[in-house]
Image (spheres, grey):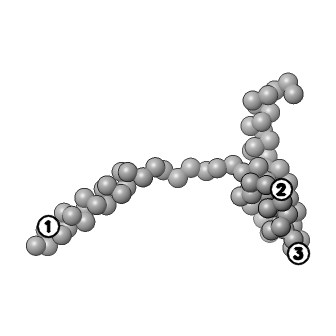
Amino acid sequence: MKSILFAALAASTIMVAGGSAPATAHDYPYCLQGKQWGYPGNCQFTSYQQCLATASGTNAGCGINPRVALESQERHPYR
């Protein structure tokens, strides 16, 4: 009985591990920047307004994610 339970557990673990996609980093366009965040900062904001709302009342500001800015330059080098 233990071996059947173990086999079922092993099979379900393999299915979950094999069926899931690896985590990928997403570069959002805006970063919360300040002393406590370092550089480039906390880059998890899809809009400038989201970033500003999070920065409100703190000693932090918002800026463009340098990775996104560089990617944009690489796509359009003569703009």
Mark closer to the chain start, 2 or 1: 1
Q: Quick check: marks 2 and 3 in contact, CB under 8 Å?
A: no
| Vertical placement of residue 33 versus 21, above or below | below
| Vertical placement of residue 71 versus 9, above or below | above
The residue at the point 46 percent across, 49 percent down is: 21
Q: Give neighbour class at mark 3: few <14, some 14-19, many 20+ (Cα, 10 Å).
A: few
Mark closer to the chain start, 2 or 3: 2
- Provide the residue designation for mark 1: 4
Q: What residue type is labelled 2?
A: Tyr
- Quarter of the image that includes the N terminus: bottom left
Secondary structure of the residue carrying numbered label 3: loop
- Residue 20 seen in the current view: yes
Q: Give neighbour class at mark 2: few <14, some 14-19, many 20+ (Cα, 10 Å).
A: some
The tag on residue 48 is 2
- Quarter of the image that includes the C terminus: top right
Give me the C-alpha separation between circle 2 and circle 3.
16 Å
- Provide the residue designation for mark 3: 57
Secondary structure of the residue carrying numbered label 2: helix
Q: Which amino acid does label 3 sit on?
A: Gly
Examine the image and state in which quarter residue 69 appears: top right
Q: Nearer the viewer, mark 2 or mark 1?
A: 2
| Vertical placement of residue 71 versus 47, above or below | above
Residue 28: x and y, percent? Answer: 72, 51
The residue at the point 37 percent across, 55 percent down is: 17
Give me the C-alpha separation between circle 2 and circle 1.
54 Å
Residue 35: x and y, percent? Answer: 84, 67
- Residue 39 seen in the current view: no
